[in-house]
Structure formats: C-alpha cells, structure tokens
C-alpha cells in the first residue's frame, strides 16, 4: 500500500491557519463585525475554502504530472484513488454533522464548529467537482478536452457560492429601492 500523506498535513495546517485567522486576527474581528454568522459568514468561508482548495489541488496535480516532488498520486493496492473520493467522504461527513446540528448553537465553540463545517464543505465540494468530468465520462479525462466540464462545474458552483455570499445584500438593497425608500429623482 502506497499513500502520499503529504496532503493530510497540508489540509490540516491550512484548515488550522484559516480557523485561526477567523478567530484571532483583525481580519477575523472585521468579518465578525460586518458579516452575520448565519448564513452569510458560512457562505463566505465555504466560498473561500472552495476556491483555495480548487487552486491548490490543480497546482498539486500539475506537480504530480510533471514529477515535482513530494507530490504523487494516492495509490492503494495498485489502484489510483482520485481526490474525488476524498471530496465525497468529506461532504458525507459535513452532511452528517449538519444533520446532527453541529455548529448550530450561539456559543463560542458552536461558532467555531460552524466555521469548520463551512470550511470542510467548500473543501469537499472543490475536491469533488474538480473531477466532475470523471463522473460524466467514467474515465480519466482530466487533461483532455472533455475535462473542461470540470471547469464548467467549478465555475457554476463557485458562482453560486459567491452570489449567495455577496448577492443577498445587493438584491435586498435593490428591493428596498423599488419599495419607495429611494428619493424621487425629479
């Protein structure tokens, strides 16, 4: 059994660094003041995690294909395990956590759990959708023309996360303007 364990410490360190930044830095304090915990902060965390994970995974796959150490494919008993598998497992874990209402309280530990679940959701979604073309074609088409459907899926879902995060205030401001709160231009 040959497994590349470098990914696990990278993911753990990145997760810890992001959670630390959200809790113990000026940026974290700024976000807590300006963005309500639910659902907008969760959406923001998931969105940032999604795009960072996608960029990181694409970079790691580039390194693997070009034989840049220490990266290489995860192999178990001679079988290549695609990162899509890890994404699905993470999404199942997050879904189960949300079914058990992990991170739904208002105390400090619950808000931390909420942030962790959101971060893991973005991570799992990126790992899964990065290999969307594999689902569609049932063969590895990562670097050929058919692999473009993975980019399409990433762009569509990433746009949904971004619009959900930033679009709500724009749409609510637009709705307020239509309701007569806006001064008459004449």
Image: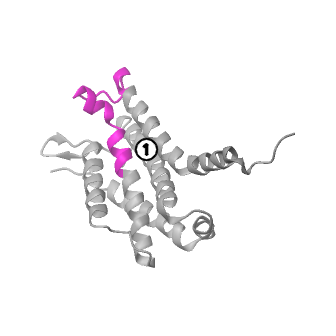
The residue labelled by disc 1 is 54
Total numbered labels = 1
Q: Residue at x 19, y 50 (%)?
A: 2
Residue 136 counted in the magenta span: yes
Q: Position of residue 5 (x, y in %)?
A: 29, 56
**Within 10 Å of the Cα at label 1, are there few (<14), some (14-19), or many (20+) other Cα atoms?**
many
Quadrant of the rendered image containing residue 27: bottom right
Instruction: Indicate whether 120 appears above or below 69.
Output: below
Q: Which of the image's four quarters has the C terminus?
A: top right
Q: Secondary structure at mark 1?
A: helix
Q: Where does the magenta region start and end?
A: 124-147
Nearer to me, 150 or 67: 150
Instruction: Indicate whether 121 appears above or below 110.
Output: above
Residue 93 counted in the magenta span: no
Q: Position of residue 118 (x, y in %)?
A: 41, 59
Q: Position of residue 173 (x, y in %)?
A: 65, 49
Q: Position of residue 178 (x, y in %)?
A: 67, 43
């Amino acid at each position: 059994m040959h497994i590349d364990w470098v990914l696990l410490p990278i993911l753990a360190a990145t997760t810890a660094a992001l959670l630390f930044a959200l809790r113990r830095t000026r940026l974290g304090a700024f976000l807590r003041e300006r963005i309500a915990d639910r659902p907008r902060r969760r959406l923001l965390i998931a969105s940032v995690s999604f795009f960072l994970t996608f960029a990181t995974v694409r970079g790691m796959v580039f390194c693997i294909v070009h034989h840049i150490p220490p990266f290489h494919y995860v192999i178990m008993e001679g079988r290549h395990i695609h990162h899509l598998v890890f994404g699905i497992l993470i999404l199942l874990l997050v879904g189960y956590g949300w079914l058990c209402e992990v991170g739904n309280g208002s105390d400090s530990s619950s808000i931390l759990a909420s942030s962790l679940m959101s971060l893991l959701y973005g991570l799992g979604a990126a790992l899964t959708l990065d290999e969307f073309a594999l689902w569609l074609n049932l063969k590895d088409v990562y670097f050929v023309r058919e692999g473009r459907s993975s980019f399409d899926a990433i762009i569509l879902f990433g746009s949904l996360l971004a619009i959900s995060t930033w679009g709500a205030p724009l749409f609510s401001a637009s709705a307020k303007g239509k309701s007569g709160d806006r001064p008459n231009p004449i």
